[in-house]
Amino acid sequence: MARQGSFFLKSLVLFLGFVGFVPFGAKAAVKKYQFDIQVKNVSRLCHAKPIVTVNGMFPGPTIYAREGDRVLVNVTNYAEYNMSIHWHGLKQFRNGWADGPAYVTQCPITRGQSYSYGFNITGQRGTLWWHAHILWLRATVYGAIVILPKQGTPFPFPQPDQEANIILGEWWNTDVEQVINQANKLGIPPNMSDAHTINGKPGPLFPCSEKHTFAMEVEWGKTYLLRIINAALNDELFFAIAGHNMTVVEIDAVYSKPFSTQALLIAPGQTTNVLVQANQNPGRYFIAARPFIDVPIPADNKTAIAILQYKGIPNTVMPILPQLPSPNNTEFVMSYNDKLRSLNTPQFPAKVPLNVDRHLFYTIGLGRNPCPTCVNGTQFTASLNNITFVMPQIGLLQAHYFNIKGVFRTDFPDRPLKSFNYTGAPLTANLGTSLGTRLNRVAFNSTVELVLQDTNLLTIESHPFHLHGYNFFIVGRGIGNFDPAKDPAKFNLVDPPERNTAGVPTGGWTAIRFTADNPGVWFLHCHLEVHTTWGLKTAFVVEDGKGPNQSILPPPKDLPPC
Ligand SMILES: *[C@@H]1O[C@H](CO)[C@@H](O)[C@H](O)[C@H]1NC(C)=O
Ligand SMILES: *[C@@H]1O[C@H](CO)[C@@H](O)[C@H](O)[C@H]1NC(C)=O
Ligand SMILES: *[C@@H]1O[C@H](CO)[C@@H](O)[C@H](O)[C@H]1NC(C)=O
Ligand SMILES: *[C@@H]1O[C@H](CO)[C@@H](O)[C@H](O)[C@H]1NC(C)=O
Ligand SMILES: *[C@@H]1O[C@H](CO)[C@@H](O)[C@H](O)[C@H]1NC(C)=O
Ligand SMILES: *[C@@H]1O[C@H](CO)[C@@H](O)[C@H](O)[C@H]1NC(C)=O
Ligand SMILES: *[C@@H]1O[C@H](CO)[C@@H](O)[C@H](O)[C@H]1NC(C)=O
Ligand SMILES: *[C@@H]1O[C@H](CO)[C@@H](O)[C@H](O)[C@H]1NC(C)=O
Ligand SMILES: *[C@@H]1O[C@H](CO)[C@@H](O)[C@H](O)[C@H]1NC(C)=O
Ligand SMILES: *[C@@H]1O[C@H](CO)[C@@H](O)[C@H](O)[C@H]1NC(C)=O
Ligand SMILES: *[C@@H]1O[C@H](CO)[C@@H](O)[C@H](O)[C@H]1NC(C)=O
Ligand SMILES: *[C@@H]1O[C@H](CO)[C@@H](O)[C@H](O)[C@H]1NC(C)=O
């Protein structure tokens, strides 16, 4: 480890801004926020550069609400980039207009314009997050959403004394839009990030880190709830605190069966709540995050560090480093994921669909398409069922709601047209894909099982998939090819983890189930931004039901036009 001296970080400013549990009144209420999209000059790793922020903050402001509240966020764009904000994991029942992905549920908020996102928080409590959902702007435009239980409703785990948000991110020294534009032009993967960050700060393993290390002060004997969010663009991360085990109690704003662990894995898009007891020798302990990479592809493997410091301990005490799983420790990842279970109590039941109306099987492919202007005459591409998604010029939800023809087709195939040995030896042919804005139509209230199958076209890799508008149950997971004859017998239909973002293992498959009871157009995509950019995305059109509260609400008046 380099630069021992800098570990002392005498000038650290300790984070004492823990939040109590009643930041506002008891009754369900309307919570109003103003988000000004502003460019601010920010310095990390000895480099200063202008970044896009919300209200000049990096990370951005936390949204606090209670279950049952209505939230209004007026977003005003003062930056030169088009903007839209996604409220990641909020179900937005009948209300896709507030979901946020650009050209999926809305047109962007252009410079000088405002759009007020209005949504009710119904039947959800826990940690979620918000981020830009256009271009690569989510690299710096992100923040936490903390949904407290209804007043008087306790957590289903021991009440912590205090809580803090821990947001993991990725930092580039150059402008992220230039990074991705350059890569797209050349047809090659984008430059990897220069650092990982914890609450926007890379920590003492990086230069110029004195002021850029997040440190939290704890009191001996107290229990802390940490709300951990992975806001990184392209990296699944291991996370650990030296000398302290963590008890996982919630994932993606769903309570889970508690278990103790020395380290956890969190994929981009996911959140994990843990309880940490400050019950060790009072001292200074490093908190660390580093990627999980189990394929030989170039990736930023650098470690971000923060500090957990007991009250009364001076900044000159040398902190202890935690033991993170090695970057390629697939075994740890499998065993960690196996421990994740829904709480499944009478108060918080796991309503797993037992009968399936629609069986879907989507293959994930990385490939190359011709590109005459690119350096090697080809560009990297990605596909689902061999279809690379083409973004439309107007919002898909508008096209659906107003019945505008010619924007998308609803002929996305339920399974690949050609079956092959998906995870067998890499194929040298068939690396091309077909292009299209193709969606799958799903009947209201039907039950859907989707098996996402990684393939070895070009290379296998793990993919965290995010579905908008829903949580789903991860009923099964495996390595190799999904076997429809044998694998379903092993599904967990009792207490599978419920999430909004699920990892598909490297060279393997993941089976998810959900009930399509939220009408609208809902994005489904890999949450590795580089893969989304290459086309690893599609959407479901969930039809309206016949009942009075089963159709898409009318759009708000200030919905941005195209
Ligand atoms: C950002 O800060 C750097 C270093 O202080 C300075 O050189 C640069 O001009 C600033 N850029 C802007 C846009 O203010
Ligand atoms: C949003 O903010 C802008 C800029 O301050 C303001 O003009 C607009 O009236 C606000 N909209 C709402 C709905 O509050
Ligand atoms: C949100 O709840 C309010 C009542 O508090 C209701 O009037 C409104 O229609 C709901 N909006 C959505 C988008 O569900
Ligand atoms: C990406 O990395 C290459 C090689 O280090 C460098 O020449 C290029 O300027 C970088 N691009 C951007 C946009 O930073
Ligand atoms: C953390 O858990 C491991 C494995 O269960 C155990 O060996 C260790 O003693 C625990 N450490 C602390 C500080 O509780
Ligand atoms: C990180 O990657 C570099 C090459 O990019 C390699 O030399 C180094 O050993 C890796 N570090 C770890 C911890 O895997
Ligand atoms: C993980 O990486 C280490 C060091 O690079 C290597 O020795 C080991 O074989 C790898 N393990 C697996 C399971 O690939
Ligand atoms: C271009 O192709 C050559 C030969 O296959 C390869 O060595 C090189 O890495 C490729 N360059 C890029 C930018 O993909
Ligand atoms: C698929 O490929 C793998 C790896 O090459 C091989 O072990 C397996 O037998 C193949 N399966 C089939 C059905 O051909
Ligand atoms: C994907 O589609 C392209 C273009 O139609 C075709 O050339 C290729 O063989 C297909 N690959 C697979 C794996 O189906
Ligand atoms: C959805 O279907 C289930 C099972 O068929 C039924 O019990 C439920 O009432 C339906 N819900 C709605 C909103 O139609
Ligand atoms: C911003 O969005 C508007 C509305 O969709 C579009 O007309 C314009 O081309 C976009 N600007 C850029 C730079 O993409």
Image (tube, grey):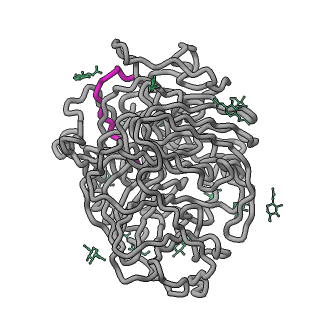
Query: Which residue appears farthest toward the left when viewing the image?
Result: 489
**Residue 327 x/y as whole percent:** 43, 69
Q: Nearer the viewer, residue 452 or 132?
A: 132
**Residue 172 x/y as whole percent:** 65, 60
Q: Is residue 452 magenta?
A: yes
**Residue 224 x/y as whole percent:** 38, 64
**Residue 488 x/y as whole percent:** 20, 41
Residue occupying the point 56% across, 37% down: 32
Q: Which residues are magenta?
A: 442-455
Residue occupying the point 48% across, 67% down: 290
Q: Is residue 327 above or below residue 82?
A: below
- Residue 183 appears in the picture as rendered: no
Q: Is residue 115 above or below residue 277?
A: above
- Residue 229 appears in the picture as rendered: yes
Q: Is residue 454 magenta?
A: yes
**Left or right for 190, reference 15:** right
Q: Nearer the viewer, residue 4 or 375?
A: 4
Q: Nearer the viewer, residue 255 or 297?
A: 255
User: Which of the four quarters of the rendered structure image does ligand 8 lie in?
Assistant: bottom right
Residue occupying the point 20% across, 30% down: 355
Q: Is residue 486 above or below residue 221?
A: above
**Taken as a whole, is the magenta stretch helix, strand or loop?**
strand
